[in-house]
Image (cartoon, grey):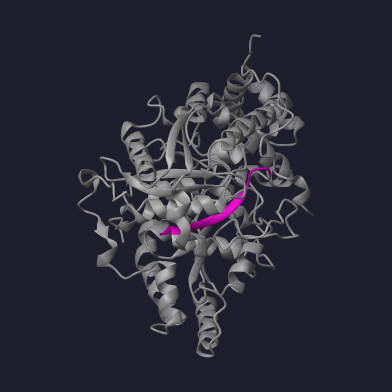
Amino acid sequence: MDIVDLNDTQILTLAQAAGVSITESDACEVKHQINAIIQMIEPIDVGKIPTVEPLPIDLSEYTNYDKTSDPDSKPSILLESTDHPKFSLTELAKNIRTKQTSATEILKIFLKRIDSLNPKLSAFTDVYYESSLAEAKRLDDEAQRGVFRSLLHGLPVGIKEQIDVAGRATTGGSLIFKTNITPDDATVVSKLRVSGAVIIVKLNMMEFAIAETIEFPWGTPLNPWNTERTPGGSSSGSAIAVATSMVPATLGGDTGGSIRMPAALCGIVGFRPTYGRVSRAGSLSACWSMDTLGPFTKTVSDCALMMESISGFDKRDIYSNKRSVPPYFRKLDKSEHKVKGLKIALISELLSPDFVEPEVINAVENAAKVFEVNGAKVDRISVPRVKDAGITHWTICFTEFAQANKRLLQNHLQELTHMVKIAVATGTIIPGGAYYKALQLRELIKHDLLKPFEDFDLILTPTMTSGAQPPNSNVHTNSKEEVLEGLHGAPKLTAPFNLAGLPGLSIPCGFTSEKLPIGLQIVGKPFDETTVLQAAYLYESNTDWHTYYPPIY
């Protein structure tokens, strides 16, 4: 079947029918987006959709080696952690428990770092000086009485701008919502407070987490490893803050890779849990069927602590799962025993030199050797369908965001930053047939990614195809071909696992020749975050990539 491109007049007519007012110049750019999406998705043969998936998630539970680091690739200009104070959650927790320091003293250290570093990096949209100091004082009083709520007691945590903090604005990174004061905490924030964490900042992000952009109302977030390179997104500030120890742990959101990608580019740990493991109640949605919330930390131990705090069933989120939350932190002690005998898969299509840089492939293959030396069996498998994940992800995300935010688009479309405006306007008029095919493709991709778990325990892939790249300097879409190239790009390595609802963690596994971090992605079975964390912990314990800090520190 011949595919005929839509013209500007047709785009304007469709937008008007959808109740969205766009300009003629906007229509030209939306035309390129729509035509590229149709050209990519229409020819894909979905064949017969499987009706029974392996390892199904029970919907009834949804209610309302020696170290292998290559010395030649270690950037000599980097700073090892031994030269700096210990800013990991686990180290700080130990100091508070033994009363070597207090929550207030720790908080003041981080506030000082924020004042010093944030003007250079634009990681934050707001800093809660008074309220965080008052909360630290209350937690110090509890500690003096011998009351410790958890290992997070008295420790600062930052929150991405899409997540509600009571009495504060949740902007989604947009000036449109700058007065959107929320009365209640998101569930994850409530859980952190119950655990004794001190909410210290709100973190910068790409507007509404729906499209790559270089326009940030609160300043452009910069990568601390090289300020001329992107830190990734959409959870840009969350990654920058942890990488530079302005905050020891943060929360972000991940719809197609928005936790794992910036974590990889900034050289830290980022974890996207299984869909349903962590409540999303009280967070702005980019794509309801794939949105997840998760932590950024410097180490795997810190990640396990955060996961224990934020995970669990929540009646406010109808897709929240009732499964009990394992003691992730304690189970790290059994990591070495757990990894022995594990079967680990490398997906050939996600290690293709056609789009993954050779030094990234080399770093991931070296990481796989660490697991082999520690008793795991590693094999390559083929999952051809993953090549369709990028177009599937974008088609679903653009459509779902536009349909869930009709009032925003009808009343404020022209107030959005340009790249986001074009993306969401596109979402309003994506043909129903394209969206339907994307849903079919999601089921096929999910089926094809769950099937290997009949024989394997984990999947390893790169998190990104390269180190951090310069940001796109052009906010305009000039041709269909330009869009097609972008649709083939990020998040091609991370989005497949969002489509399948699987847990995935990014951990540093090396550096490029340009001294930029490389991320290893570890993916597990549904709701088996424990094995993912144990594997990551063993890898971290046998390498030293996590002990390096960026030049801006």
Q: Which of 212 and 316 is in front in this view?
A: 316
Residue at the (37%, 50%) spot, across then down: 223
- With respect to residue 303, does 227 lie above or below? above
* 361 lies left or right of 535: left
Q: In which quarter of the image is the N terminus?
A: top right
Range covered by the magenta-colored residues? 289-300
Residue 277: image quadrant is bottom right
Residue 404 left/right relative to 132: right
Q: Where is residue 401 in the image (x, y as percent from the top left)?
A: 67, 42
Left or right: residue 174 versus residue 406 is left
Locate residue 246: give its quadrant: bottom left
User: Residue 307 colored magenta?
Assistant: no
Specify the quadrant that holds the C terminus.
Answer: bottom left
Residue drawn 32% across and 35% down?
362
Q: What is the residue that sits farthest to the bottom in this orientation?
A: 145
| Nearest the eye: 125 or 94 | 94
Residue 207 placed where, x, y %? 55, 48
Give how far across and how far down residue 492 sits, in percent.
50, 33
